[in-house]
Image (tube, rainbow, N blue to C red):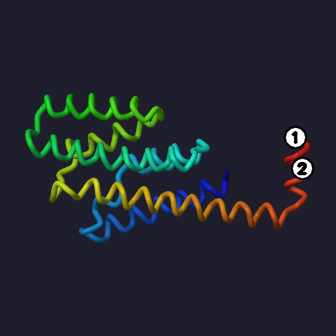
Amino acid sequence: MWIKSSVICGYLLVAYWLSSHFGLLKMCFYPSLGAFSYFFISRNLQKTETVKLVGAAIAVAAAGSALNALHPSSVAFLLTCIMALGIIHFIRIQAAPLLAVALIPFFAPLPHLWTLPVFVGMSLLGLLAALQLSRGLEAVWAAARPEAKAKAANL
């Protein structure tokens, strides 16, 4: 788990650095990305669940952006909450970061309607790539340390 955590911290640091140094990549980092990171490392999701989760994140980000652009109000905020919770219930994965991503447009000004969904998709794909890298590193670590594998088997 420490390898995954280290890789994720590195990924979050790179995303933060990119977003703070390049104006075009400002939406590359958002606090919910940290929540998604923990969500992914704390659960063993199947590929279909992962695809559903990333698709749902893009969908709620697009819906939240659209509702906020159409009419930035309490009603739009409420509709965004209801819609995001409905999608969480529909996909049957308890993922609170989805609600957080849907609400970003109400707290951070977006230059264009498409900005948030695109950057949410890109950042989550980067996160999944970082997790795949961490799995590879864990496999190398386990292969290099056979005594650790035997010790874990005896626990």
The location of residue 4, given as percent across then percent down, is 62, 55
Secondary structure beneath disc 2? Answer: helix
Residue underneath mark 2? 151
Secondary structure beneath disc 1? Answer: loop
Give neighbour class at mark 1: few <14, some 14-19, many 20+ (Cα, 10 Å): few
Q: Is residue 75 left or right of residue 148?
A: left
The location of residue 25, given as percent across then percent down, is 29, 66
Answer whether labels 1 and 2 touch (C-beta < 8 Å): yes
Q: How many marks?
A: 2
Q: Hey, what amino acid is under mark 1? A: Leu
The location of residue 17, given as percent across then percent down, is 39, 66
Please report the residue visible at 27 percent of the width from the left and 32 percent of the height from the top.
83
Q: Is residue 66 left or right of residue 56?
A: left
Please report the residue visible at 27 percent of the width from the left and 28 percent of the height from the top.
82
Q: Hey, what amino acid is under mark 2? A: Lys
Please report the residue visible at 35 percent of the width from the left and 34 percent of the height from the top.
87
Q: Quadrant of the C terminus?
A: top right
Residue underneath mark 1? 155
Image height of 141 relative to 53, above or below: below
Between 95 and 49, the one nearer to me in the picture: 49
Quadrant in which residue 67 is drawn = top left
Between 91 and 111, the one nearer to me in the picture: 91
Image height of 93 relative to 5, above or below: above
Please report the residue visible at 33 percent of the width from the left and 64 percent of the height from the top.
19
The location of residue 35, given as percent across then percent down, is 45, 44
Quadrant in which residue 3 is drawn = bottom right
Quadrant in which residue 123 is drawn = bottom left
